[in-house]
Image (cartoon, helix red, strand yellow):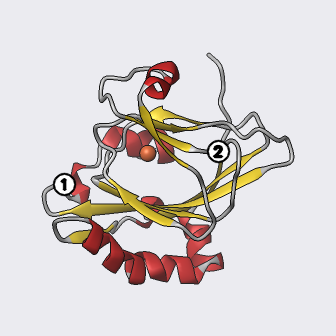
Amino acid sequence: MRHITRGRVHAHHVRSRLPWLYESYRGAFLELAGEACGEKVTPARDNRYSVVLNVQRGTQMRFECHVDSNPLTGLLFCTDHVNGGELVFAHDAAAASIAEVERDCSVVRPSAGHLIFFDAREYPHYVRPLTQASDMRVVAVMNYYTESCPESTRPAALNRHLYGDR
Ligand SMILES: [Fe+2]
């Protein structure tokens, strides 16, 4: 199996080193999330998957094609990228590979300071690789929940995979 590396600043480090981000996740950004969503939005109670930083360095790291388990994700882009590093959403929920996603998609180019919210439970998405070895892409990823899809629906298998929960 091919190993895909990716970088992450875990939530407990965000909380201690970037308190403004941790507080915004539960404050100002939560309010904006509520405006973007038709129902009441709540932050994660479990801090491990509340707000993290995803970090992509050079051309080898990638964030693979997937769908989300949480009903609302907020992304705060922290770096600018002209080429590479785009977030790509398939229009076809059945798209099963990067080639199929790319065939018919929406593309979000990272722009530092831009905050977006989306529900990507159905539509596969991935991040294009960076094009420069010296480049670094940083994005804050915020997991939110709603009344119709509360935190209790988060798959236990995901926590086992990510955190070794039993
Ligand atoms: Fe995602």
Q: Which residue is mark 1?
A: 149
Residue 89 pos. (x, y %): 43, 39
Instruction: Find residue 63 and report its image quarter.
Output: top right
Residue at the extreme right: 134
Q: Which residue is mark 2?
A: 85
Q: Amino acid at mark 2?
A: Gly
Left-right relation of 64 to 43: right
The residue at the point 43 percent across, 67 percent down is: 47
Residue 2 pos. (x, y %): 65, 19
Frontmost of labels 2 and 1 is 2
The residue at the point 32 percent across, 70 percent down is: 33
Dot 2 or dot 1, earlier in sequence: 2
Distance, label 2 to label 1, CA atoms, is: 29 Å
Residue 161 pos. (x, y %): 46, 38
The quarter of the picture showing ligand 1: top left
The residue at the point 44 percent across, 20 percent down is: 100
Left-right relation of 21 to 61: left
